[in-house]
Image (cartoon, coloured by chain):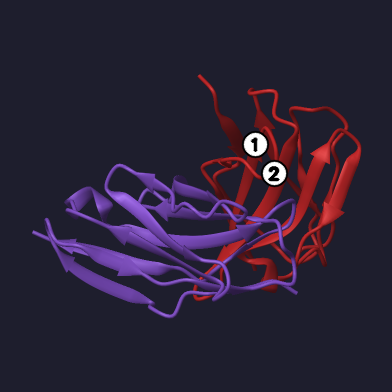
Amino acid sequence: EAQVTQNPRYLITVTGKKLTVTCSQNMNHEYMSWYRQDPGLGLRQIYYSMNVEVTDKGDVPEGYKVSRKEKRNFPLILESPSPNQTSLYFCASSYRATEKLFFGSGTQLSVL
Amino acid sequence: AQTVTQSQPEMSVQEAETVTLSCTYDTSENNYYLFWYKQPPSRQMILVIRQEAYKQQNATENRFSVNFQKAAKSFSLKISDSQLGDTAMYFCAFGDYKLSFGAGTTVTVRA
């Protein structure tokens, strides 16, 4: 089944404890991206990647890191999480950025 | 910076009726793409419709259609013959590699 798999679905952590949210797609997509969703703000793009080893900042990259070492995986890393990073996170992929995005199921992150 | 404005936080519609969601955006680019995504209570994001900015013809997808006015930077979504399964939050988005989303409009379809 074609899908974008995000893990974990729920995560509660404490300030400063490094964490990684994994994202993997099995559709051979070139483009992958990360978003955070907050009430009243919609989705905001954190980082995107046009291909392996090519990543660029979205609108809200501060406090996040990404890597694209292989085509299928695009993990989101929070080196030192803070409470303002409490949010619902989505990973997405597509053949090209201008095509339909396939979204993961989301990760609800709470930073205490 | 790219901005997207959805001016209607919530809308309610009777089953089988029509509802129109507004979306305006601001960009200095000439070539871009526009999307409407739906997020039902399951929180899964689903593409509703896609429009290429260089195409004059408005996109349609079954009961969903858009009114794209490039000069006015407006991209509204019309849902015809509303169904209970259309109850969801709807997000307008545009861009290319960098994608900007609006804050969303919650649509409730009443039986």
Above or below, B48 relative to B69: above
Q: Number of numbered discs present?
A: 2
Q: Are marks 1 and 2 in contact (CB under 8 Å)?
A: yes
Above or below, A21 relative to B38: above
* Residue designated by label 1: A94
Looking at the image, the residue that sits furthest to the top is A1
Q: Residues within 10 Å of mark 1 (few under 14, many from 20)?
A: many
Kind of residue sitting beneath label 2 = Ala
- Identify the residue at image location x=72%, y=62%: B30
Looking at the image, the residue that sits furthest to the front is B56
Residue A23 x, y percent position in the rendering: 68, 37
Out of B107 and B64, give the one closest to the viewer.
Answer: B64
Q: Which chain is red?
A: A
Residue B91 x, y percent position in the rendering: 47, 61
Looking at the image, the residue that sits furthest to the bottom is B7
Kind of residue sitting beneath label 1 = Ser
Residue A42 x, y percent position in the rendering: 54, 67
Image quadrant assignment for residue B99:
bottom right
